[in-house]
Image (cartoon, rainbow, N blue to C red):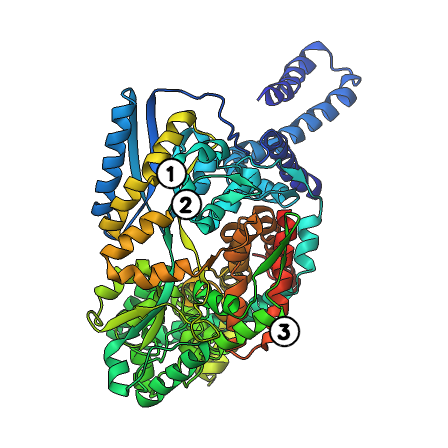
């Protein structure tokens, strides 16, 4: 067969395929709802917890109160697994027809979801909502992007210092009151008990590392006129990074093992009894209780640089938001208020131990349960939040900060070089986000 | 179909009419070219007609996705565009520019090439050596080796990787205990982590090489091998001068397959080094593309990486085939 025809036919096939294909450019979903129906079925996605039944009870109560008020509305709740939430929620934004009306989402995702065009602006409803006045300002900030509100805070999560009371008594130690003391205490424990990590730290545990940066007066990024610039390489931030990374090494937490660890791995190490201290959240309570250290630990706020100071913690937690594609906007906002209202949050604390986002409700529950006292104190001392830019989602997803910590603790780069590179990557992400 | 019918008609008609009208020598110069062209026409398109069903399926399954991949790589296409938060815009070569100016891309590309080359060489070495071994041992050990190899082959990549990570675990792994390595962490150092992944890749891909080459050796006439051994050829000499040349077509296929597989390694790196290792030291192109495209939703940049990989693999394959053909081997 001749070469010409040998080439011509496949080329023709390609061109033909190309022609039929040009009709289908990559798809783009239309997320703007045109209707606001006052009856029908509302679909809700909430996160599936490890022990979900207590949460379900609280949610069912809130729904019962809601359907009593709106007789012709029905609510369908689906509990989605936390590990695959990113794909599920992306898919919901891509296909508004099968998307829910209301979702629970991690508060660091707010800005990203807003940029994706997935969440509805509910500034007006939130402003008119009486209960919202008592919301903790950091929690409000976690639903706010560019001055507009995109959801209601559902609960807050905050981290503090777990320590082993038996080990501390045995070695005659006191819980550390400053960060310098924290480092020296950790190293003393490791020296006395080489089978334990003094404090379990992780190279990929960004939220455990941030308080060190903030306590030294550093910031992740600074905002001016709606755009963010990285501040991770500032002198103050570097000091915090130095303190945190000094905890990696054979004298506390060997880099070969700890560089790869994330938050869960450090809490697991503490719960299984291989660490004398760890930075864990109020939400880690169940995991630690289920471990070998049950009854042998206590919690204090993570100390700041000077005695008496508390290191500013990262205000984690989840929000409830209405999807922009919802065809039942008014009903969905009402249901959101039921879920994130004071009654539901009180119930959620009793059932799951999730900290309320309202300052008054939080103070009220702290009296009931002494375990949450150090966490509430940490919250009261002031918390910080990640930059409210969609660039943060990308910085988080492309593991910019874990890479920085890992480069330092594995000795690939020094603090100045690693934080400089991280700042460059962050700035690219911020400028891409616009 | 229509084309076929019209092409066939002129051929049939003149044949019947020509002898009936006149024996004059005038018509023939007119009809034969037509007949000839009609005949050639038919034979030129007939093979394609038969190939059409397969080509349509191929076009739908291969060409269209590649076309989409290429198209997306020229757009600004992130999660915001997919879900309609922002309009899709044409970026031209912007994604490629971003990619080529990223020093990490070049590091990852170099690591991928070196790692894939090491994997291919080791896999082929181990696979061929064991194939020869298979021909030399008795039935029972051969069966055992075959079963072991097939077991490795049949193990899903995720399972295999997880088991290997566990075997080499610094705290609980039996390998460190047996070798007396204490709590040496294989995944901490860049080279040891790549070595660990290489072992796993070789383990799960040598069976294909072994079985294929073994089948090839079995197909070599025993007289040839007998003649070689009568001439006093050593084991190595027999392999190099007799078996390998006769196996060349098989070795070519196996090598290209291995290159493509090992260049595209994903699961092993993703699972064993937790998504690219400490500070991304163990990233290979495929994992890098995944991190860009899916983890951080930069679909267009991920597509650009995909296109670059496609071009590299196509080039490697074509150059390799060309080299082989120049040595007088038709596949």
Question: What residue would you read off at disc 2?
Answer: A135
Q: Are marks 1 and 3 in contact (CB under 8 Å)?
A: no
Pinpoint residue A164: horizontal percent, then vertical percent. Answer: 27, 76
Give above or below for B262 relative to A44.
Answer: below
Residue at disc 2, secondary structure: loop
Q: Quadrant of residue A201?
A: bottom left
Q: Are marks 2 and 1 in contact (CB under 8 Å)?
A: yes
Q: Nearer the viewer, residue A262 or A281?
A: A281
* Residue at far top of view: B21
Q: Tell me if I can see residue A355 in this picture.
A: no
Question: What residue would you read off at disc 3?
Answer: A417
Question: What residue would you read off at disc 1?
Answer: A131
Q: Quadrant of residue B91?
A: top right
Residue positioned 24% across, 58% down in the render: A369
Pinpoint residue A257: horizontal percent, then vertical percent. Answer: 40, 76
- Quadrant in which the C terminus of chain B appears: bottom right
Disc 2 sits on a residue from what chain? A
Cα distance, mark 2 to mark 1? 8 Å
Residue positioned 48% across, 78% down in the render: B189
Pinpoint residue A362: horizontal percent, then vertical percent. Answer: 33, 51
Cα distance, mark 1 to mark 3? 47 Å
Q: First in sequence: mark 1 or mark 3? A: 1
Disc 1 sits on a residue from what chain? A
């Amino acid at each position: 067969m001749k070469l010409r025809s040998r080439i011509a036919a496949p080329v023709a096939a390609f061109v033909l395929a190309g022609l039929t294909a040009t009709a289908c450019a990559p798809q783009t979903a239309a997320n703007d709802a045109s209707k606001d129906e006052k009856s029908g079925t509302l679909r809700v996605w909430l996160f599936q917890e490890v022990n979900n039944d207590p949460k379900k009870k609280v949610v069912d109560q809130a729904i019962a109160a809601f359907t009593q008020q709106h007789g012709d509305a029905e609510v369908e709740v689906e509990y989605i697994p936390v590990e695959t939430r990113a794909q599920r929620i992306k898919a919901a934004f891509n296909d508004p027809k099968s998307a829910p009306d209301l979702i629970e989402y991690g508060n660091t995702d707010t800005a990203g979801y807003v940029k994706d065009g997935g969440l509805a602006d509910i500034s007006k409803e939130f402003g008119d909502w009486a209960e919202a006045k008592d919301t903790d300002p950091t929690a409000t900030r976690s639903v706010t992007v560019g001055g507009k509100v995109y959801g209601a805070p559902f609960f807050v999560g905050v981290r503090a210092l777990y320590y082993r009371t038996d080990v501390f008594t045995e070695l005659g130690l006191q819980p550390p009151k400053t960060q310098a003391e924290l480092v020296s205490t950790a190293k003393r424990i490791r020296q006395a008990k080489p089978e334990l990590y003094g404090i379990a730290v992780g190279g990929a545990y960004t939220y455990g590392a941030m308080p060190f940066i903030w306590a030294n007066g550093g910031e992740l990024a600074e905002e001016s006129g709606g755009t963010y610039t990285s501040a991770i390489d500032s002198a103050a931030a570097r000091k915090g990074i130095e303190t945190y990374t000094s905890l990696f090494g054979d004298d506390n937490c060997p880099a070969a093992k700890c560089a790869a660890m994330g938050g869960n791995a450090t809490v697991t190490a503490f719960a299984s009894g291989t660490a004398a201290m760890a930075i864990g959240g109020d939400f880690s309570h169940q995991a630690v209780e289920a471990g070998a250290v049950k009854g042998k630990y206590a919690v204090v706020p993570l100390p700041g640089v000077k005695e008496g100071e508390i290191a500013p913690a990262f205000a984690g937690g989840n929000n409830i938001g209405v999807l922009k594609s919802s065809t039942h906007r008014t009903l969905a906002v009402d249901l959101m208020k039921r879920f994130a209202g004071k009654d539901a949050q009180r119930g959620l604390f009793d059932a799951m131990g999730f900290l309320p986002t309202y300052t008054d409700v939080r103070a009220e529950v702290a009296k009931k349960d002494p375990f949450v006292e150090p966490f509430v104190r940490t919250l009261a001392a002031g918390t910080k939040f990640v930059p409210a830019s969609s660039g943060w989602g990308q910085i988080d997803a492309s593991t910019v900060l874990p890479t920085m910590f890992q480069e330092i603790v594995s000795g690939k780069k020094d603090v100045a070089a690693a934080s400089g590179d991280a700042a460059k990557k962050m700035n690219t992400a911020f400028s891409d986000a616009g | 179909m229509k084309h076929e019918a019209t092409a066939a008609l002129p051929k049939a008609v003149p044949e019947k009419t020509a002898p009936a009208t006149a024996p004059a020598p005038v018509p023939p110069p007119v009809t034969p070219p037509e007949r000839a062209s009609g005949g050639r026409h038919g034979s030129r398109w007939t093979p394609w007609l038969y190939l059409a069903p397969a080509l349509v399926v191929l076009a739908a399954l291969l060409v269209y996705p590649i076309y989409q991949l290429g198209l997306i790589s020229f757009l600004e296409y992130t999660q915001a565009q997919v879900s309609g938060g922002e309009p899709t815009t044409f970026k031209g070569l912007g994604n490629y520019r971003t990619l080529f100016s990223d020093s990490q891309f070049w590091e990852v590309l170099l690591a991928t090439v070196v790692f894939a080359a090491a994997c291919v060489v080791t896999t082929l070495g181990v696979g061929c050596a064991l194939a020869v071994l298979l021909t030399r041992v008795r039935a029972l050990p051969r069966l055992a080796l075959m079963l072991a190899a097939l077991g490795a082959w049949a193990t899903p990549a995720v399972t295999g990787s997880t088991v290997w990570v566990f075997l080499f675990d610094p705290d609980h792994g039996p390998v460190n205990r047996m070798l007396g390595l204490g709590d040496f962490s294989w995944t901490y150092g860049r080279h040891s982590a790549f070595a660990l992944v290489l072992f796993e890749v070789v383990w799960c891909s040598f069976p294909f090489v072994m079985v294929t080459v073994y089948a090839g050796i079995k197909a070599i006439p025993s007289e040839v091998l007998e003649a070689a051994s009568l001439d006093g050829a050593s084991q190595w000499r027999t392999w190099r001068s007799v078996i390998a040349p006769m196996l060349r077509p098989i070795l070519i296929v196996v090598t290209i397959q291995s290159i493509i597989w090992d260049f595209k390694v994903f699961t092993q790196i993703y699972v064993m080094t937790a998504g690219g290792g400490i500070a991304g030291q163990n990233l290979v192109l495929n994992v890098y593309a995944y991190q860009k495209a899916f983890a951080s939703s930069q679909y267009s940049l991920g597509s650009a990486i995909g296109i670059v990989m496609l071009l590299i693999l196509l080039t490697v394959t074509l150059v390799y085939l060309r080299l082989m053909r120049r040595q007088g081997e038709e596949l």
